[in-house]
Image: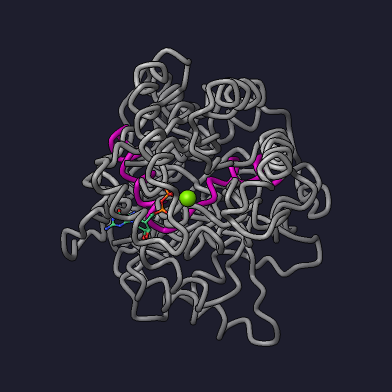
């Protein structure tokens, strides 16, 4: 069972039902607001009932502060007070968070047994009263307006199920249904560029990635780093990786048509394909960043003209990749002959990057795949509806994401990279999550018809960081 994020999660159940245990197994300590915990802060310990008023005052103000920032908040109290539940629900709804009531329908006998085993059991009469009240409110909850009501007996309280690995796939498709590519957009290679590149590629190969894509920009883009960070010419960098004996597909994501005449890009991709025995792909786009064009003396026409260029560029590339040397004429492209040797070592998929309608039309008409720069399922669905009007190319997505070992690690990374963006907004935008959470997301994307995902992470320091991502490809 997977719960929405970010969300208000209110636990409801008598003492000993397993609320605190359930929460601790799924959420970070900071995300859980517990009345017992706060009794221990302002009172003598979790059982100090004299401290209840102060503890609850704190609890309410913590809940408000967290929800106000859009942060997931798990409220660990008995959950039996309808007035408090209504208020939390209201605050969360106004803050735009999902709302979840989790009802612990643990058998009364089990609650009593666990309570008796505690250092300081709740008096039997008190527990009996909680159990009775819990039974009484079960039907109320349905009418309160929760986004989701989850009922837990002991069976369903099991940890998040894993997607079972299906075994190795020659195509390197994971058991979630996607091929996972590593997109390399930052190059913190220090004094040893070639060693860094090699180690990253070997680690990606060992981690089961289907391929490695190098970002194509002339100046490091502000979304990724600083203008003085190294950002290599990608075809040269890919040439170095071609010398490695990996099974990785190699290419760019994406090469703007404004950078090089399309025939020259075709030449580079065909050469890479020949050098790798057919392991090259070619991501192309219309280009978007005026500054790098100006600095490198390139013209940067308006969007319509760039898209025209993109369309003609793909037509040119395909003509040059095609067998034979005959003349080509069509779609505004005239080539007196199409002599291009070495021949590619295999088909070179052309992946068209971007989300715009015209871009999707170009991808459908001339490309082999599109590359959406969103991995949000609703947005993907909406873009696919547009794409399908024009044709049926493969669908790939760029997933700029934060991956952590566990929930604590995820949020440490969010805190590191969020800059001035509020943590909740950054986490959402970057789909921050654990490897397992990403695998579930990939399975959802596969169901929508996505075939490949290009993962770009801000934590790509080097080979070790790549190895940490291995679970994504299984
Ligand atoms: P709470 O009062 O609802 O917060 O319950 P706790 O989470 O503190 O759990 C009460 C006792 O039940 C603790 O000793 C837990 O170790 C135990 N417990 C909680 N959940 C489970 C469970 O799913 N299975 C088993 N066997 N014991 C559990
Ligand atoms: Mg508890």
Q: Write the residue at 47% across / 59% down.
A: 120
Q: Quadrant of residue 192?
A: bottom right
Q: Point out the residue furthest to the top here.
A: 143
Q: Is residue 143 magenta?
A: no
| Image coords of residue 39 (percent x, y) | 65, 51
Numbered label tally: 0
Please state the horizontal and vertical placement of residue 58, each as a whole percent of the image.
Answer: 73, 42
Q: x and y percent of residue 68 in the render?
A: 72, 33
* Quadrant of the rendering where the N terminus is positioned: top left
Q: Is residue 195 above or below residue 396?
A: below
Q: Residue visible at 67% across and 60% down?
A: 44
Q: Nearer the viewer, residue 277 or 317?
A: 277
Which of 272 and 62 lies nearest the eye of the viewer? Answer: 62
Relative to 351, residue 235 above or below: below
16 vs 101, nearest the viewer:
16
Q: Position of residue 246 (x, y in %)?
A: 34, 76
Identify which residue is drawn at 44% across, 35% down: 12
Q: Is residue 425 magenta?
A: yes
Viewer-proximal residue, 464 or 86? 86
Left or right: 365 in relation to 302: left
Residue 454 shown left or right of residue 111 in the figure: right
Region of the chain picked out in magenta, as a range: 423-449
Can residue 199 be seen by looking at this rendering?
yes
Instruction: Please identify the quadrant where the C terminus is shown.
Output: bottom left
The quarter of the picture showing ligand 1: bottom left
- Which color scheme does this rendered protein use? one colour
Camera sees residue 365: no
> Main SS of the magenta segment?
helix
Is 306 positioned to the left or the right of 311 in the image? right
In the figure, residue 330 lies in which quadrant?
Answer: top left
């Amino acid at each position: 069972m997977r719960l929405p994020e970010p969300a208000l999660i209110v636990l409801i159940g008598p003492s000993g039902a397993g609320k605190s245990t359930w929460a601790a197994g799924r959420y970070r300590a900071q995300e859980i607001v517990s009345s017992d915990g706060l009794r221990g802060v302002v009172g003598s310990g979790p059982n100090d009932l004299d401290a209840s008023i102060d503890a609850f005052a704190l609890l309410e103000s913590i809940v408000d502060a967290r929800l106000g920032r859009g942060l997931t908040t798990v409220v660990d109290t008995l959950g039996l007070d309808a007035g408090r539940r209504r208020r939390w629900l209201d605050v969360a709804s106004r803050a735009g968070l999902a709302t979840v009531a989790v009802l612990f329908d643990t058998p009364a006998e089990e609650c009593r047994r666990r309570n008796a085993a505690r250092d300081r059991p709740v008096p039997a009469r008190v527990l009996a009263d909680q159990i009775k009240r819990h039974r009484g409110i079960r039907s109320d909850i349905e009418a309160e307006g929760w986004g989701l009501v989850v009922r837990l007996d002991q069976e369903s309280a099991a940890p998040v199920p894993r997607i079972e690995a299906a075994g190795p796939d020659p195509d390197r498709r994971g058991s979630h249904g996607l091929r996972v590519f590593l997109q390399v957009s930052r190059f913190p290679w220090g004094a040893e560029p070639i060693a860094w590149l090699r180690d990253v590629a070997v680690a990606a190969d060992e981690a089961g990635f289907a391929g490695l894509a190098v970002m194509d920009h002339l100046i490091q883009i502000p979304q990724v780093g600083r203008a003085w960070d190294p950002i290599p010419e990608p075809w040269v960098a890919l040439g170095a990786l071609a010398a490695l004996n990996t099974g990785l597909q190699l290419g760019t994501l994406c090469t703007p048509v404004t950078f090089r005449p399309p025939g020259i890009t075709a030449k580079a991709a065909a050469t890479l394909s020949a050098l790798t025995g057919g392991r090259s792909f070619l991501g192309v786009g219309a280009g978007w960043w005026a500054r790098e064009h100006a600095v490198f003396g390139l013209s940067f026409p308006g969007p319509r003209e760039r898209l025209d260029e993109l369309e003609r560029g793909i037509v040119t590339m395909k003509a040059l990749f095609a067998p034979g040397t005959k003349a080509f004429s069509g779609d505004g492209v005239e080539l007196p002959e199409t002599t291009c040797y070495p021949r590619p070592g295999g088909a070179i998929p052309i992946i068209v990057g971007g989300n715009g309608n015209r871009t999707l039309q170009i991808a459908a008409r001339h490309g082999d795949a599109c590359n959406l720069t969103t991995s949000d399922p609703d947005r993907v669905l909406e873009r696919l509806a547009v794409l399908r009007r024009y044709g049926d190319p493969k669908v790939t997505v760029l997933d700029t994401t934060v991956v952590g070992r566990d929930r604590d690690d995820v949020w440490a990374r969010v805190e590191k990279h969020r800059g001035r963006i509020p943590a909740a907004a950054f986490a959402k935008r970057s789909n921050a999550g654990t490897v397992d959470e990403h695998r579930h997301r990939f399975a959802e994307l596969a169901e929508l018809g996505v075939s490949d995902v290009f993962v770009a992470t801000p934590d790509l320091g080097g080979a070790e960081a790549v190895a940490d991502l291995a679970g994504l490809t299984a």
